[in-house]
Amino acid sequence: MRKLGIGVFAIIFAISSTIISPATADNPPRRIVSGWLDGSPTVYLPSVDQNFKYEVIKDVSPFWYGLLSESNIRDKYTLGLYTKPITVAISDLRSRGLVLLPTITDDQPVRVLAGILANESRRAVLVKSIRDLVAKYNYDGIDLDFEKFYAKGETRANWVAMKPNWVSFIKELSTVLHADGKLLSVTTPPDFDKATKRAGNWVYAWAEMGPYIDRLRIMAYDYSTTTAGPIGPLDWTEDAIKYAVTQMPASKVYVGIPGYGRDWITKVDGSCPTAFATSIVVGGRAALSMKDAVNLPTVYGGAAKYNTTYAENSFVYRKQYTDPTNSAITCTATRTVWYPDERSYAARAALVGKYRLGGIAVWTFGKETPAAAQAITTAAKAIAPDVVVTVMSTDLSQIDYGSTFNLTGTFKLPDKTPIAGLNVRFEVKSATDATWRSIAAGTTDANGVVSSAAILGQKSQIRLVSELSWERLEGKSAEKLIAVTPRINLTLPTSVKVNGNYEVIGQILPATAAVNVTVKRNGAVFANLVTDQSGGFKFMISEKEAGLASYQVVTAASASADAGSSQPYLLLVR
């Protein structure tokens, strides 16, 4: 457990407190964006530089690797024959302050990966291959995009056996990556609560792999593929999110959002030229980027319609295809396009704040419009800070003056994720304090815990408070009263002579004025006194007979301490 900055502290050491203003629109936006980079850096980086300027981007996943076997991970970047070596591309991304989690896709035939995962030895080789790749380029981690589990040719009947093998693989890979200080991201299609009656992809075992991964990226797109329809309807997307946050901490969940649209051919009139006879057919489709899709109404006339339920646009247009050598050979295709825009991005980014998600994952950077990127930035500024749940405990609720007690605080997000590295201060408030006072500071450990031994100079309320930031609200523990039993000091001699006059000086700690003090001799009240400003008091004794006399001091309760009593003092009278 992480210790507070001052191992043992007392309320007499006070520091001035700083007033921290709440988050405003002028704060930098929260980094809520993750996503993929597909293709050459010379293509996608200029777009991202212009649109995002990296102020909201948390990490990126270049689409650079493909799994060919447990021991062979294909380097797609090198195969792409890009002008820059991969080391230069890595340097370009790092210079922008980005966390790099390259993506590995499953490029093997259906069922091959399932066989690898079912074999413990082959699975171990795969884990080593991925670990070695991450180490080779010192990546910050890896992203797995293994989609063959639900591809054509796979059956749900196979999932029962595949699921535990998949979980074992994730656990084993996570163990070695985390030991190296690296992150593990897993990209999957959506899954749903059975109550929604939606077909999900439960083979990915969200709940079982949740403890071992750092990111779950949900591919909330490709809803409509064979017929015209929305790319990733908002209600469908939100259902997947609702289920995901019940399976793992919400802070690990990233909702994938499409930067592309689809253009379907829904009708063909006339006879198409030979060059288009096989491509311009009902059911044909093409993919296009958002930035191209939003220009279609300008090119073909008409207006797109924004569907608030799906949070996407649809546009219907007609396009003619004519044989350049014979104008009589012509056909007209009616085409329906669905695509997102800045409103689509804003609606999905708002889900991050609503469900306290880790963020969004864009497929892919470079397809967006400047307006869509700005919508994300605006949403990132508007998302409320995280709530910090704080629990404080002590081993004692009453201490003797000058003794210690042990204090422990635990700081977590509402989904119970520990908050590591959180700045925490210890505050006290005694009866004489008008405000809370900070007397020590520290940071939480990896488990969100801070602890220390503590001393209080007087009875006080105590609490732990975490630092307010743009990312998180100030967290305050419940207040707890620590009672203090006073210490009573007497300068009583060990022996006195009969009929001698002796002054006895006493003091109570904590030093408190106007406290009623009763002096008892042999159990009977001998004197009633009141302490001075230093907590001091004095009285005279004169014993008349030889023998033993017992003196004891009893103090009344005060604002600084509970009632107390000294041990009996035995006095020899000779």
Image: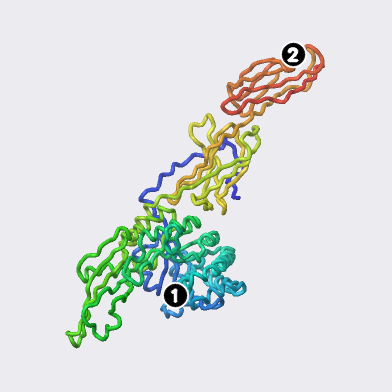
Q: Nearer the viewer, mark 1 or mark 2?
A: 1
Callout 2: SS: loop
In space, the residues marked 1 and 2 are separated at their CA atoms by 105 Å
Where does residue 34 sit, x and y in percent of width and height? Answer: 43, 63
Q: Which residue is disc 1 drawn over?
A: 152
Q: Residue at x 79, y 15 (%)?
A: 497
Where does residue 347 sit, x and y in percent of width and height? Answer: 34, 57
Q: Residues within 10 Å of mark 2 (few under 14, many from 20)?
A: some
Residue 551 drawn above or below residue 79: above
Which residue is nearer to you in this view: 161 or 208?
161
**Apparent side of residue 320 relative to residue 156 in the rendered image (left or right):** left
Residue 542 tag number: 2
Residue 43 drawn above or below residue 502: below
Answer whether residue 219 is visible to the viewer in this image.
yes
- Going by the numbered disc 2, the residue's amino acid type is Ser
- Going by the numbered disc 1, the residue's amino acid type is Lys
**Apparent side of residue 71 relative to residue 502 in the rendered image (left or right):** left
Q: Residue at x 40, y 53 (%)?
A: 353
Which residue is nearer to you in this view: 270 or 453?
270
